[in-house]
Amino acid sequence: MCIDRQWINQAITKIEADFQRSADTHLIKLDLPYLSGIDIYLKDESTHPTGSLKHRLARSLFLYALSNGWIGPETTVIESSSGSTAVSEAYFARLLGLRFIAVMPKSTATKKIEQIQFYGGEAHLVERSDQIYAESRRLAEELNGHYMDQFTYAERATDWRGNNNIADSIFCQMSREPHPIPSWVVMSAGTGGTSATIGRFLRYKKHPTQLCVVDPENSVFHDFFKHGDASITIDSGSKIEGIGRPRVEPSFIPGVIDEMRTVPDAASVATIQWLETILGRKVGPSTGTNLYGALNIAHEMIQRGETGSIVTLICDSGDRYLNCHYNPEWLQKNIAELTPFKETLKTITHL
């Protein structure tokens, strides 16, 4: 297939121009007096044009596909997603005038489906999260389109050495803080692409910073990290949208990770409720997974008499989850009792 180089040049120029119009995301320092000597920062990825961390990934995936000659002016783009990546890819597809179809489980938050449609994308729903891969490949073949396949290409589409990737951005923003080189970066994994970028950057730059990847329930990543069996699968999908997977994704690179922890789903939800009292706004449940891990690491550092900084992410806004993770009826049906984890947060933070 030979694609018009002039069209590719124009497409890449449009994406790069869009990037130049976007400022970097904010780094928010939490005011937690009890954790004296431990500074916790949240990089707020919800401020991207499409409202999530996945805006970075979608941009990289489109540039990667264009540079490889996989997308042309008539190509239908298909992606398998739990929502946020599809929202961002629909944005870039509209920018280039391309048809976009997102293959997602029916359990995907309604707000995400509406946002995909807002950007001109189409939502193709399947019963279970483990069905999205085969259905995406089938649609791409049927429509002579391109399956973007974030779960394979996320770890290679981004330049992990720098070039204003998320890790480079974090270290630039931390440069004038009391502890400019973080002791830890805490990150959850969906594709594994962001944790791969951060972990590789830390090693390439020879930073002593450790990377902790936090995993929700109903995900195989932590078991794979511990035992190395890439064939493991589970039948149920994660209830913390955007992170955790029922299979080991090709973009998940365990060798760049220093430590993994499993965070109970109820802890993630309890943490976003707690964080709302600090920030005055709602964040998505994967942010709760990230921050619960970061707060526990901070507590352990205090007990060891250590000082330093910890950086984690606000992955997206809580507005996308009003019908689920902020809905008491949904929580009662899907998430365990929050009280024990609210007590843990009080113990850690004295708030």
Image (cartoon, rainbow, N blue to C red):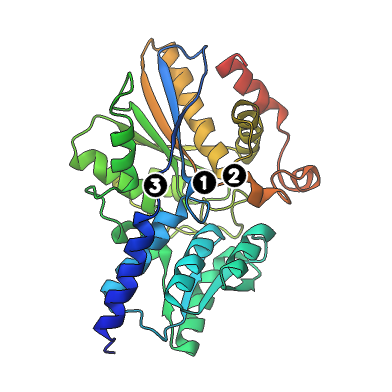
Q: Which residue is mark 3?
A: 23
Quarter of the N terminus within the rendering: bottom left
Q: Are marks 2 and 3 in contact (CB under 8 Å)?
A: no
Kindly report the distance in space between the C-alpha atoms of the residues bearing marks 1 and 3: 12 Å
Q: What amino acid type should be assigned to the residue bearing mark 1?
A: Ser
67 versus 38 height, above or below: below
Which residue appears farthest toward the right when viewing the image?
A: 329
Q: Earlier in the sequence, mark 1 or mark 3?
A: 3
Q: Which mark is residue 176?
A: none
Q: Position of residue 69 (x, y in %)?
A: 28, 79
Image disc number at residue 46: 1
Q: Is residue 76 above or below residue 151?
A: below
Which quadrant is the C terminus positioned in?
A: top right
Q: Please tell me which residue is depicted at 61% across the width and 72% down the height of the picture.
A: 123
Badge 3 marks a residue whose secondary structure is: loop
Q: Secondary structure at mark 1?
A: helix
Q: Is residue 153 visible?
A: no
Of badges 2 and 1, nearer the viewer stands 1
Q: Which residue is mark 2?
A: 284
Of 260 and 302, nearer the camera is: 302
Is the C-beta separation of discs 1 and 3 under 8 Å?
Answer: no
| Numbered disc 2: secondary structure | loop
Foreground mark, 1 or 3?
A: 3
Q: Are marks 2 and 1 in contact (CB under 8 Å)?
A: yes
Q: Nearer the viewer, residue 258 or 171?
A: 171
Q: Residue at x 78, y 47 (%)?
A: 333
Let me know if residue 209 appears in the view: yes
Residue at (60% x, 16% y) in the render:
347
Q: In the rendered structure, which amino acid carries the disc numbered 2?
A: Gly
Inspect the image, locate mark 3, and give the three-letter code of the amino acid beneath it: Ala
